Structure formats: C-alpha cells, structure tokens
Image (cartoon, rainbow, N blue to C red):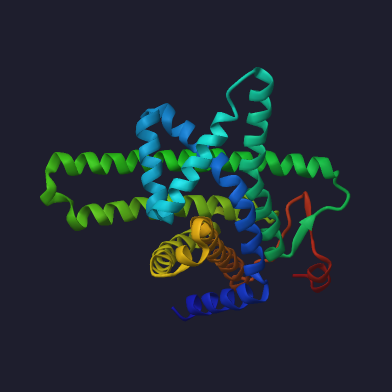
Amino acid sequence: MLRWFRILLTAAKEWNADHVFRHSAAVSFYTLFSLAPITVIAAALAGAVLGKERAGDALQQQLTELIGADSAKMIQQTGEKAAEATHGTWITTTIGVAVLLFGATTVFSQLQDSLNAIWKVQQKPSRSGWLVLLTQRILSFAMVLTMGFLLLVSLILTTALESLTAHFGAGWNGAVLKIADLSVSLAVMTVLFALILKVMPDVEVRWREVWRSGLVTAVLFTIGRFAISLYLAHSTIASVYGAAGSLVALLIWIYYTAAIFFYGAEFLKADRAAHRLPVTPKKTAVLERSQAGTGA
C-alpha cells in the first residue's frame, strides 16, 4: 500500500514539474477542431450497426451525460454541418472527407507530442518531416477508428442494459443498473486510456504496465468528470460569457479532463521508475539530450 502511495505522490510531483496544464491547453484547443469530425465518424460507425436515428440519439445522450446538454447540442450541430460538407460533387466530397479526416486526427497528433514531452523523448532528427507527419496522421486515424469502435461497444452494452431493465421491470433497475452501467463505462475507458498510453507515445511499454495506469486514469476520469460537471452546473460561466458560454464550458471540461489523463501518463512513468525500468524510445525516436546524458 505504501508503495502505491509513493507512486501516486511521485506522479503528482512529475505532473506539476512537466507543466501538464500547458499541454492540456494545447489539447483543448485542438480538440475543438477534432470533436465534430470525430463525432461524425463515430456516428457513422454506430449508425451502421444500430441505425442512424438510434445511434444519433444514443450518442447525444452519452455526450449530454459527459459535458452537459448545451455543449452536447453545440457539438451535434457542428457535427451535422461537418457531415454536410461530405455531400455534393465528387470534388467537394473528396475535399470534405479529407478535411474531416485531417480534423479528426489533429488532437491525437498533439496528444502524441504532449506524451513525448512527458516521457522526455522526441522524433529522430534524421527522419523526414513528411514521413513523421504521415506516420502521425495514420496512427491518429487508427485511434479515431478505435474510439469509434469502443463507443459502439459502449452504446451496444448500454442499450442491452436498458433492454434488460425494460424486460425485468422498474423494480430491477435501481442500484444494479447503476453499478452495471458504471462498470461498462469504466471498462471501456480503461481500454481506451490503456491503448492511448501504449500506442501514442514514442516509448516502449508493456501491456501489463499500461492496464494499471489505464484503470487509474479511468477511475480518476470518472471522479473528475462528476466534479467538473458539478462545478460547471453551479458556475456563472453562462451568464458571464453569454452566447459563448457553452463553448467556454466545453473548453474548461476538456482542459481539466486532459490534465487528469496526463496524470495517468505520469502514473505510468512513475510506476515504471518504481520497478527500475528504463525509458526506452521506439526505433523512430530518441531520448532528449538531458535524459540521454543522465542515462534515464
């Protein structure tokens, strides 16, 4: 127990030393441009299985639970406008799809840069800039598809739980349904965070290491989500910023949840350090000079 406390404390110290709020601000900015395209892609994947209308309603419900009704409505409207850009002549459709894919992958490229900064690694200077960009975009698009698939799994499981509730009656739902729903949410988020921590940074880590960090991040994310939602519900953001209140609230939500995620990355780094595991860059990356000099 003491060892875990030390890891949590070390992660908190590194979290502060690595200026994660600066990275959170960057992620928040790029997420604004990525949310609508990601929503369109996720809705398309879910719609292929659940049906367009049912998938849209389920996705809207998930977003509302996460970030509130106003911000969710804003994302939905932006997503609808983005989807319209993919219809028309083959030229406008091609351009629209390209812009959609580029926008959806932008936040993951920034996320990779931030995680590399936390791990103190960087892309090899000898690598072609275009090759690095292409690799980042392909990897980021793979993560977008993975997110869409995990969202689909979550929607299917949530729908199944609702069907069970309807079948067994209102008396059955109560605490059992809430626990089951929370368990599904935690499981999906653990897989998502573990995947990002494993795949995105240019560092060699083992799966058994990222699962622990993925679970810690998912638990902290769940707690933080309720805390941030409670704060936004009782804040004066809407009255202060007027029509832009939903956008500001969304930015604040992304900002703090990104900071929570980066703590998960720091936890993984601290956990590995506690087991005396060295930071080993992937073949495409190198340690930063300060780290290489200390042999970290």
In the rendered view, would you say 168 is above or below 249? above
**Residue 267 appears in the rendering:** yes
- The residue drawn where x is 62% and y is 76% is 16
Q: Position of residue 21 (x, y in %)?
A: 62, 69
Image x and y of residue 101, in percent: 63, 36
Q: Which residue is at a point 66% across and 18% down the rendered structure image?
A: 90
How far from the left and from the top, in percent, is residue 137? 69, 41
Instruction: Say left or right for 164 vs 14.
Output: left
* Residue at 58% over, 73% down: 11
Count of marks placed on residues: 0
- Residue 258, image quadrant: bottom right
Quarter residue 100 falls in: top right
Residue in the foreground of this view, choosing between 25 and 233: 233
Q: Position of residue 77 (x, y in %)?
A: 49, 41
Query: Does residue 26 appear left or right of residue 236 in this picture?
Result: right
Q: Is residue 194 left or right of residue 19?
A: left
The residue located at (73%, 65%) in the rendering is 120
Q: Nearer the viewer, residue 185 or 44?
A: 44
Q: Nearer the viewer, residue 282 or 77?
A: 77
